Amino acid sequence: MFPPTTHILVVDDFASIREVVVKSCTELGFTKITQAENIQGAWEKLISADPPIDLILSDWNMPGGTGIDLLKRVRAEPKYKTIPLVLITTENEKARIIEAITAGASNYIVKPFTTDGLKQKLEAVFKAKK
């Protein structure tokens, strides 16, 4: 599993959803969590983060740009392309999951989710990263 000092960027346009994700991350022992409400804010926080972002948890559907847009931008930038990015969404159609994985998503979580479900997905991402 990722260490507790992993710097996580949580991206979602709804504050209530960000709070749920942050709460789950905190319950899993993570202590460094940054939040953004849209793709532009996420990018700004990513490039200015100190310490650097180690993991991104992003919603798929947001106004002004999707989680897939953020994913493609992160994967296109050599400095950030290896940062694990997990999409969190209500989209559960097989075609959408394939689209996310094809675009380079590290994993995919369908809302609503539990802290245990998030832990399982993050463990899988961590194992794949090694």
Image (tube, rainbow, N blue to C red):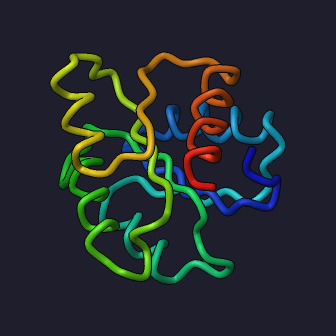
34 over 61 or under it: above or below: below
Left or right relative to 27: residue 119: left
21 over 73 or under it: above or below: above
Q: Which residue is drawn at 63% across and 44% down?
A: 127
Residue 41, located in which quarter of the rendered image?
bottom left
Name the quadrant of the N terminus: top right
Left or right relative to 17: residue 52: right
Name the foreground residue: 94 vs 50. Answer: 94
Q: Which residue is drawn at 62% across and 38% down?
A: 122
Q: Residue at x 22, y 18 (%)?
A: 94
Residue 64, located in which quarter of the rendered image?
bottom left
Residue 117, located in which quarter of the rendered image?
top right
Left or right relative to 9: residue 27: right
Name the foreground residue: 58 vs 82. Answer: 82
Q: Where is residue 129 in the image (x, y as percent from the top left)?
A: 57, 54
Q: Position of residue 108 (x, y in %)?
A: 41, 32
Q: Residue at x 36, y 29 (%)?
A: 89
Name the quadrant of the C terminus: bottom right
33 over 75 or under it: above or below: above
77 over 100 or under it: above or below: below
Q: Position of residue 10 (x, y in %)?
A: 52, 50
Task: Give the mark count.
Answer: 0
